[in-house]
Amino acid sequence: MISFEQIRYFLEIVRCGSLNKASEHLYISQPSLSKQLRQLEKRLDCKLLNRNYDGVEPTPQGRLFYEKMSGILDEFDRAVDQVRHFKDVHQLRIGGLGNLVTYFLPRYMENLKAGGKNQVIVDTCLSNRELVDGVESGKFDMVLLSNAEPQKDIAVIPLMTEPLYVVFPVTHSLYHREDISFMDIILHEELVLYKDPCTIRASIRKQCNRIKITPNIVLELDLTESLLSYVSRGNGVTLLPSIVAKGIQDPSVAVRKISQIPIYREISAAMKKENVPFYLPMFSENTASP
């Protein structure tokens, strides 16, 4: 039977290009190393190395065996290391609304991993309520919320406030406007918005109620990607948070800041109160990735 030890010996011989150097690295005598190599060649029924005055070099079969086994043993070593340190790795379970998981969370991912001490598991939900329930039940260690309400038993900490942007096709007449007001959008545009329940939708509704105007909503969709797809085809305009709008790479749509009566959304992290000292520093802007 071929052993992992024999394979490791062979790989080290190829890396060193010499049995003598390999025996020094492996802390094994050269005769013992040669014996292990002969046994491996016997098991494989082929010659793996050619000896020359400079040392050794792999035969075609030896080169193939080296290339295949290098990756396999690297993966084996990683698996062994993960199992050995399994108790040292903490699973950090994070929930969030879809656009926060996609556009906001990545900049903090290295902080959250804590140098490999945390295995970060991320899941998305459609509502703040579902996420808060997840913290209360223990499903999530922390969650990312939009325009969150205070909670009795859960700490809700604001992280960032951002404006909403209007998003429209580059062929739209708004493309040539420098100033676009919320009133212009609500009075004259067909809107493609997130489905309820949605905190962004609630902010838009609140502003519309304040100015006593009913918006012309032509489509309601769940996903940001769906909103952008319909907007790019000219089915209307949409309103998105700045981190989402600025991340759009579709050349067929344009984004503009709303100049008058701006609407904002607040991003918060929620977690059990006893976990705040441990988790909140992970969202420090000083150590976040750009």
Image (cartoon, rainbow, N blue to C red):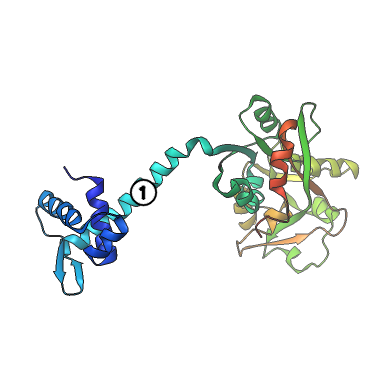
Residue type of the residue flagged with mark 1? Glu
Q: Position of residue 217 (x, y in %)?
A: 73, 44
271 above or below 23? above
Q: Residue at x 60, y 51 (%)?
A: 110
Image quadrant in which the N terminus is located: top left
Q: Position of residue 227 (x, y in %)?
A: 64, 49
Asked which quadrant contains residue 149, the reply is top right
Q: Position of residue 177 (x, y in %)?
A: 79, 67
- Residue, disc 1: 75
**Residue 192: in sight, yes or no?**
no
User: Looking at this view, is 237 or 287 the one in front?
Assistant: 287
User: Looking at this view, is 264 or 108 the one in front?
Assistant: 108
In this view, which residue lies farthest toward the front? 29
Task: Assign a secondary structure to mark 1.
Answer: helix
40 above or below 145? below
How many numbered marks, from 0 up? 1
Image quadrant in which the C terminus is located: bottom right
Q: Position of residue 119 (x, y in %)?
A: 54, 42
**Residue 133: in sight, yes or no?**
yes
Mark 1, other Cα within 10 Å: few <14 / some 14–19 / many ≥20: few
In this view, which residue lies farthest toward the top? 137
Left or right: where does residue 51 sit relative to residue 153? left
User: Looking at this view, is 175 or 130 the one in front?
Assistant: 130
Q: Residue at x 10, y 51 (%)?
A: 42
Left or right: where does residue 234 sit relative to residue 6? right
Asked which quadrant contains residue 233, the reply is bottom right
Q: Residue at x 65, y 29 (%)?
A: 134
